[in-house]
Image: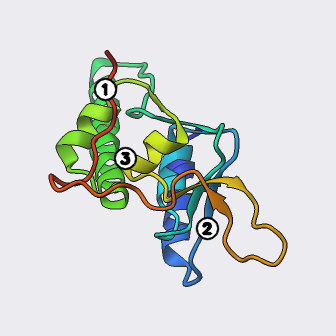
Amino acid sequence: GGSVTSGLAIYDTMQYVLTPVCTWCVGQAASMGSLLLAAGAPGMRHALPNARIMVHQPSGGARGQATDIAIQAEEILQLKRQINGLYAKHTGQPLSIIEAAMERDRYLSPVEAQEFGLLDQVLVHPPPRGEDEPRLVQKEPPNSPSGPPQIPTAS
């Protein structure tokens, strides 16, 4: 998690550098951390099998005069639109699905996050000696004829 503006600075740097950036979720990638996980180079976004990933809309607090509060509210709504667009870009999900998923805290297992497009591989074991490929829970996300898989909904 963490500050949206700090996270966006890291995001911009990841997108700017020429070297592909490999991302790993070890333990938890929550809030801005989940966006940075998704922003890794395609095929290089990983999680360990017991990690947790959480997505949600940005939060903040406003104080001061009514006009100042209105300015701060518009700023957080703009950040929400901007971040939703970045999630859509990196997951391949339609913006409407991203908006629905971000409405409340949504916790995902690594396989659920992979199906949603936040990451590419869930690693179980490092490569055995003499092999190049690690053992994966699921090597490639399933392809659906109706488009990208949707995030699981709370029942």
Label whose residue precedes the other's in the sequence (2 or 3): 2
Which of labels 2 and 1 is toward the front?
Answer: 1
The secondary structure type at the circle numbered 1 is loop
Task: Find out whether the residues at labels 2 and 3 contact each other: C-beta distance under 8 Å.
Answer: no
| Mark 3 lies on residue | 116
Query: For residue 73, which quarter of the picture?
Result: top left
Q: What is the number of the mark on residue 125?
A: none
Residue 71 appears in the picture as rendered:
no
Q: Mark 3 belongs to which amino acid?
A: Phe
Picture layout, residue 44 above or below residue 148: below
Q: Is 82 placed left or right of 131 in the picture?
A: left
Q: Which of 71/119 is in front?
A: 119
Image quarter in which the N terminus is found: top right
Tell me the residue at 70%/46% (across/down). Answer: 26
Residue at x 44% of width, y 61% of height: 140
Q: Mark 2 points at which residue?
A: 22
Asked if 153 appears above or below 51 in the picture, the reply is: above
Question: Mark 1 sits on what residue?
Answer: 153
x and y percentages locating residue 154 in the rendered image: 34, 20
Which of marks 1 and 2 precedes in the sequence? 2
Q: Choose top left, top right, bottom left or bottom right for residue 96.
A: top left
Q: Circle 2 — which element?
A: loop
Q: Residue flagged by tag 1: what amino acid is it? A: Thr
Where does the image place residue 38, in percent across and percent down from the top left? 47, 55
Q: Earlier in the sequence, mark 1 or mark 3?
A: 3
| Frontmost residue, 85 versus 148 | 148
Q: Where is residue 117 in the image (x, y as percent from the top left)?
A: 39, 53
Label 3 neighbourhood size at 10 Å, few (<14), some (14-19), many (20+)? many
Residue name at image x 51 percent, y 37 percent? 31
Q: CA gap, disc 2 to disc 1?
A: 28 Å
